[in-house]
Amino acid sequence: MVANRQFTKSARFSKQLQLVSRATGSSGNGGDSSEAFPAAMTLADAYQILGLKESATYDSVVEAKNRLLGKFEGQMEKKEEIETAYDLIFSQQLKARLSGNLPVSNRVRFADVSAPKRKPLGKKGPLELPGGAAITVRQMSSDSAVSTAAVFGGLAAWTLAQGLFFEPTPMGSDVPGLQLALGTAAAVYLLRENKRVGLGKAGALAIAGLIAGSLLGSGIESWLRVDIVPLGSLSSPGIVVGEFALAGLWAVTFFLA
């Protein structure tokens, strides 16, 4: 029985090789595969035997064939009819595929192209600094976040107090230079300590946060004009810009790495 099964498999493999050869036109007869099947069986008959419509996909054809072979186990004549119907549909779909008239699933064994690899939508790689270091979004742990907020909150309060209790000067000496310098140094230290960022990358992130915050603060100050219309006791443009610069330093320290 084992030898009989091996012979059957070998015969079917040889038959499918013949079908592929005929479908591709390599046998010299113009690619006509109908000669491999009984004259009485048409393509419509083949689909009817498998219980399928002519628009059925290859996967549906294979599924129907396997189901019917299991149903008629032991009935050699019926099984041969099912196999012949499958081979006829196989040949027809292969010819349509080779001529470009049939979209075939990438699971089909005779497909001659692999499925294209698509990049996931909405996913982008990390930003990179000029030196090649990647910038990622990574928040701090809760303990580190509290200490970071305390540091920059203290610097912001100190800056605000300077703006409230000291009169601005025309030369711009009210700019909180010391607080900004301390904030920049604190940002570098906290990035290295809490997120294990290299010194160069930490410095670049801190400078970027300082510049971004200053630009935002300058834009808001040009709209508020606290030197003309003070916010309570606050009439220093430099203090307003300084507060936003400190906020930029805090944001970089808290969110980026």
Image (tube, helix red, strand yellow):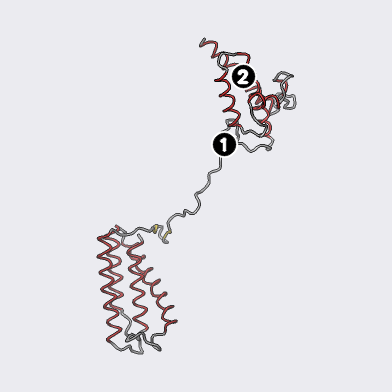
Q: Which residue is mark 1?
A: 106
Q: Is residue 26 above or below residue 210?
A: above
- Residue named by callout 2: 14
Up/down of 116 relative to 90, above or below: below
Q: Which class describes the residues within 10 Å of circle 2: few (<14), some (14-19), or many (20+)?
A: few
User: As shown in the figure, which amino acid type bears the numbered disc 2?
Assistant: Ser
Q: Residue at x 32, y 84 (%)?
A: 174
Instruction: Tell whether 49 sits left or right of 130.
Output: right
Percent from the top left, x then y, of residue 214? 39, 75
Q: Is residue 4 above or below residue 244?
A: above
In the rendered image, which quarter is residue 59 located in? top right
Q: Position of residue 203 (x, y in %)?
A: 33, 66
Task: Report the residue at 61% width, 36% height from top.
Answer: 104
Q: Quadrant of residue 109?
A: top right
Looking at the rendered structure, the secondary structure element under dot 1 is loop
Foreground residue, 71 or 100?
71
Q: CA distance from mark 1 to mark 2?
A: 24 Å
Q: Amino acid at mark 1?
A: Asn
Q: Residue at the spot x=37%, y=87% of the render?
A: 230
In the foreground, 143 or 56: 56
Residue 75: which disc? none
